[in-house]
Each structure stands twice: as structure tokens, then as C-alpha cells.
Image: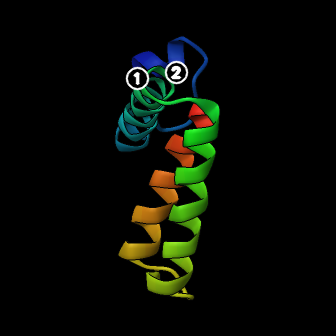
Amino acid sequence: MKHTDLLGFNQDIDIDNLLKEASCRQKSQELADSYSTEELQDRLDQIMRDMEQEAEPEGGPIADMYADEMDAYEGAL
């Protein structure tokens, strides 16, 4: 029996996903501390324009990179 079973958790914990979320929250906080709301929105708008030009429409590593950046900026707003 696993310790997580004793605590009532019956699903696997995705450590990589938890670390990625924590990193995104930290980056969002750093962005919020460094830029005004207007600057953040301008940067987010630019990221979206860049993504439309560069990212793969079907998804892939470049699209994932832009998604992470957008998440950080949206979290900062």
C-alpha cells in the first residue's frame, strides 16, 4: 500500500507539471513586479502576434514555448 493511498489520494502526482506551474507562477510574479499593466498587455499582444507568425498551427515545441510565455503574462495581469 502506498502512503498516498492512506491519505486518500488515488491518482498519480505529475511532478513535472507541478514544477512547471510553480515556475510559471514565479515568472508571473516577477513580471507583475517589474512592469505596469499597460506594459504587460503590450508585451502579451506582441507575443500573440509573434506566435501567429512563428508557431506551428498543429502544435509543437514552438507553440508550447509561446503558450508558456502567454500564461506567465496573463498570470501577471
The number of numbered discs placed on residues in the rendered structure image is 2
Quarter holding residue 19: top left
Residue 14 sits in which quadrant? top left
User: Are the residues flagged by discs 1 and 2 in contact, CB closer than 8 Å?
Assistant: yes
Label 1 environment density (alpha carbons within 10 Å; few <14, some 14–19, many ≥20) = few
Q: Residue at x 46, y 20 (%)?
A: 33
- The residue carrying mark 2 is 5
Q: Residue at x 57, y 73 (%)?
A: 49
Say the numbered circle drawn on residue 13: none
The answer to which image quadrant residue 76 occupies is: top right
Residue 24 rendering spot, x and y as whole percentages: 44, 37
> What is the x, y in percent for residue 72?
50, 42
Residue 64, image x, y percentages: 44, 66
Rendered location of residue 23, percent (x, y): 37, 33
* Depth check, front residue: 15 or 39: 39
The residue to which callout 1 is attached is 2
